[in-house]
Image (cartoon, coloured by chain):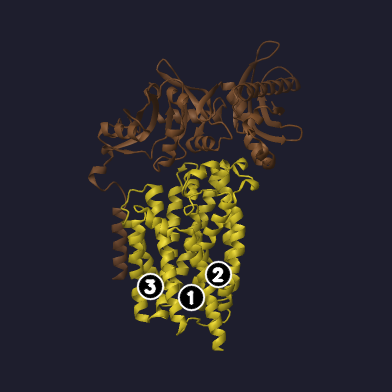
Chain colours: A brown, B yellow
């Protein structure tokens, strides 16, 4: 009797614990948000959400997306306004990406990101993108889809032409202040979006736009490059096409007689061409070294943006010295940075 | 109480590790400082203090006889019952606060703690042997889940995220140490368990403390290396760490974390209810001891359910100073009284 009762209870609990039991929580009554675009217009946040159109599915495994917008003095107000306009209950747990519009990245991204960090429904793994144009335009682009945005985020690992970041990574960079936050940059042309480099932040405001080459150099210097594809013109004319894999970097810091960083970049290269291996290796090595040095010059020395983890390295490896610095950021900008490249060509 | 009430020394080890471990998993919740990096250093200090705190209890356990019979033993048992009730309240408060404010689970705030309390009470009535067997199985699941989480997050760890030792604030180290030591309600619980243990209690307890704090030490460093300064913004950094995990097509493994953590909380509550019942048996009578766990359970449930809505209750429950004082009192003063009483009795 006891066993029958126990099995009965298990069945009751199992059946009642799954699915959407109250009728008002049916999927077509929920606003299942897939992505959010945020703009700042006249001191008001304007939100554009892409949501799963569960009321009108197209079938064949594809889910149609719809858009809604709202505005408010805070991100929460704007999101609430958006949800109210649709008359559905929002579900933020499925949100896969956030696009920060041009107005917002110029004015500061701390406030909205703080909201997304604190609000439990948003996952810390959400991909963050920036755009120089409005987020609304990006969200309503013809080719916009969750899959495409995920592909953009994966571009870092596949080609090294952008630097993708998640919510927790951007927020950690903003709150520590010891490194510049970086996000992928989305551009729009003929109503179609594409990934085009990255945006680096000075504090919480956009400080520089990184080209695809600068993204590649930054990833190599930070040791975050997984696979890199590049093409450049050799001195004798003609293009050299190569790829890099197994990239590693090591930053050493010395503080005797001023701060000096040595960044050693180690990687395997694959290239095709008629030139001898030694010559090709030397050209690729020189290309990478030049690219890395010019990126450091452009970003660190001119824009004062440390996207290379230099201040973090100094903080971590020589905290005693770091503590004595009145302005660590300035000290890092004025430091000497040497790049040592070690490339092994495989043909 | 139960049908069989004897457990082995290794079962005691598993039971203590799981019961104490579930609280550490929610570390950072008390202070809200989130400085999980300095927790590694605190773990070393807390290990030493915990071993010192366990000496009187282990000294008592050496005789293998019941220490709380008659006279002053009744009063002391009553005090211990209140202390373990306080520990139940803290555990349930943390459970409801994590569920309500962090996980965003849209289940009634009262339903899960109610079911949990009912299940834990049932577990406590089955006796220490049943709790220990269940604990060993759940500990295996907890370890397996944490290994999976660690493996999935290995690629996200960055040594630069670890704060340098010199950057630790003394106040954070003290706060974390106070929390870690304050949470040691399992040490006084040993007074009520050791007569049910077959084997070397001393060896199990020392091994438990070493394994526990080594795990806390390693996990603190690992979590800090994954989260970096993001941990500073999180009320439950261990849960936030679990939220980042994914394994191939398996995404959002925090559900795995929640499942094993909930199972661990169940074992902890069942153990505490069982200990409360033993305390009341010594203090009052065998009949009353059967009623005590549900009565205490109802009060703890009310407090825990009110905590997410009432900051005063939450602060009272999660007051680290009170917690440390209560634990130190129950680990040092009360066992000292019992030792003196036993000596005078001889």
- Circle 3 or circle 2, nearest the eye: 3
Q: Which callout, 3 or 2, points at the residue further toward the start of the chain?
A: 2
Calculate the distance from the C-alpha at mark 3 to the C-alpha at mark 1: 15 Å
Q: Quick one: label 3, few (<14), some, or many (20+) residues within 10 Å?
A: many
Please tell me which residue is depicted at 34% across the width and 78% down the height of the picture: B288
Name the side, left or right, on which B290 lies relative to B13. left
- Up-down: is B297 above or below B306? below
- Up-down: is A15 above or below A44? below
Label 2 resides on the chain identified as B
Residue at the farthest left position: A23
Please name the residue that numbered disc 3 is placed on.
B125
Circle on res. A171 = none
Name the side, left or right, on which B104 lies relative to A338. left
Q: Where's residue B36, x and y in %?
A: 55, 49
Considering the image in quadrants, where does the C terminus of chain A appear?
top right
For the residues beneath circles 3 and 1, the answer to whether they share a chain is yes
Circle on res. B192 = 1
Please name the residue that numbered disc 2 is placed on.
B10
Q: Which callout, 3 or 1, points at the residue further toward the start of the chain?
A: 3
Q: Is residue A277 visible?
A: yes
Residue at the farthest front position: A326
Considering the image in quadrants, where does the N terminus of chain A appear?
bottom left
Please tell me which residue is depicted at 43% across the width and 32% down the height of the picture: A97
Instruction: Tell me the SS state at disc 3.
Output: helix
Calculate the distance from the C-alpha at mark 1 to the C-alpha at mark 2: 17 Å
Instruction: Tell me the SS state at disc 1.
Output: helix
- Circle 3 or circle 1, nearest the eye: 1
- Circle 1 or circle 2, nearest the eye: 1
- Circles 1 and 2: CB atoms closer than 8 Å: no
């Amino acid at each position: 009797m006891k066993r029958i009762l126990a099995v009965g209870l298990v069945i009751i609990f199992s059946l009642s614990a799954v699915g959407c039991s109250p009728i008002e929580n049916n999927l077509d009554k929920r606003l299942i948000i897939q992505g959010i675009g945020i703009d700042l217009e006249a001191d008001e946040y304007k939100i554009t959400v892409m949501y799963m159109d569960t009321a009108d599915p197209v079938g064949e495994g594809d889910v149609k997306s719809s858009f809604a917008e709202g505005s408010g003095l805070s991100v929460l107000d704007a999101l609430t306004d958006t949800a109210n306009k649709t008359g559905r209950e929002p579900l933020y747990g499925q949100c896969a990406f956030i696009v920060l519009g041009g107005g917002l990245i110029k004015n500061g991204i701390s406030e909205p990101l703080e909201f997304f960090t604190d609000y439990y429904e948003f996952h810390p793994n959400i991909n963050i993108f920036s755009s120089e144009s409005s987020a609304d335009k990006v969200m309503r682009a013809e080719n916009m889809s969750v899959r495409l945005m995920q592909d953009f985020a994966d571009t870092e690992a596949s080609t090294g032409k952008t630097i993708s970041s998640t919510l927790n990574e951007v927020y950690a960079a903003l709150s520590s202040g010891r490194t510049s936050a970086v996000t992928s940059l989305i551009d729009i042309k003929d109503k179609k979006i594409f990934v085009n480099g990255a945006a680096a932040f000075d504090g919480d405001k956009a400080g520089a736009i990184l080209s695809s080459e600068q993204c590649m150099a930054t990833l190599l210097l930070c040791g975050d490059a997984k696979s890199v594809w590049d093409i450049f013109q050799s001195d004798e004319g003609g293009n050299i096409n190569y790829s890099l894999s197994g990239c590693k970097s090591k930053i050493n810091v010395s503080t005797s007689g001023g701060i000096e960083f040595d960044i050693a970049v180690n990687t395997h290269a694959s290239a095709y061409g008629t030139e001898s291996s030694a010559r090709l290796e030397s050209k690729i090595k020189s290309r990478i070294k030049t690219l890395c040095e010019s990126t450091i010059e452009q970003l660190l020395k001119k824009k004062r943006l440390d996207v290379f983890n230099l201040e973090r390295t100094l903080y971590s490896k020589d905290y005693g010295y770091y503590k004595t610095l009145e302005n660590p950021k300035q000290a890092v900008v004025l430091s000497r940075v040497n790049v040592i490249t070690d490339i092994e060509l495989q043909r | 109480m139960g049908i069989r009430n004897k457990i082995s020394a290794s079962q005691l080890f598993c039971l203590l590790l799981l019961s104490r471990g579930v609280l550490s998993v929610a570390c950072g919740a008390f202070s809200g400082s989130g400085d999980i990096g300095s927790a590694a250093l605190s773990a070393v200090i807390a290990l030493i203090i915990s071993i010192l705190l366990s000496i009187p209890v282990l000294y008592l356990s050496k005789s293998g006889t019941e220490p709380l019979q008659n006279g002053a033993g009744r009063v002391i048992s009553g005090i211990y019952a209140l202390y373990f009730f306080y520990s139940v309240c803290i555990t349930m408060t943390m459970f409801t606060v994590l569920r309500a404010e962090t996980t965003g689970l849209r289940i009634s705030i009262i339903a899960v703690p109610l079911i949990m309390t009912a299940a834990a009470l049932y577990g406590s009535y089955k006796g220490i042997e049943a709790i220990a067997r269940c604990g060993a199985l759940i500990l295996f699941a907890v370890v397996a889940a944490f290994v999976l989480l660690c493996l999935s997050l290995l690629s996200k760890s960055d040594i630069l995220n670890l704060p340098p030792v010199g950057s630790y604030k003394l106040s954070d180290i003290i706060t974390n140490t106070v929390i870690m030591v304050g949470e040691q309600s399992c040490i006084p619980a040993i007074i009520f368990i050791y007569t049910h243990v077959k084997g070397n209690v001393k060896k199990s307890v020392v091994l438990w403390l070493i394994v526990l704090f080594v795990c806390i030490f390693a996990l603190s460093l690992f979590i800090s290396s994954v989260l970096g300064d993001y941990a500073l913004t999180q009320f439950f950094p261990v849960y936030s760490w679990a939220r980042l995990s994914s394994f191939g097509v398996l995404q959002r493994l925090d559900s795995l974390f929640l499942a094993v953590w909930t199972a661990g909380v169940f074992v902890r509550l069942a153990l505490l209810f069982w200990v409360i019942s033993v305390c009341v048996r010594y203090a009052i009578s065998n009949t009353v001891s059967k009623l005590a766990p549900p009565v205490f359970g109802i009060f703890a449930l009310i407090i825990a359910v009110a905590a997410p809505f009432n900051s005063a209750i939450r602060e009272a429950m999660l007051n680290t100073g009170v917690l440390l004082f209560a634990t130190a009192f129950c680990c040092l003063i009360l066992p000292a009284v019992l030792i003196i009483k036993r000596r005078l009795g001889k």
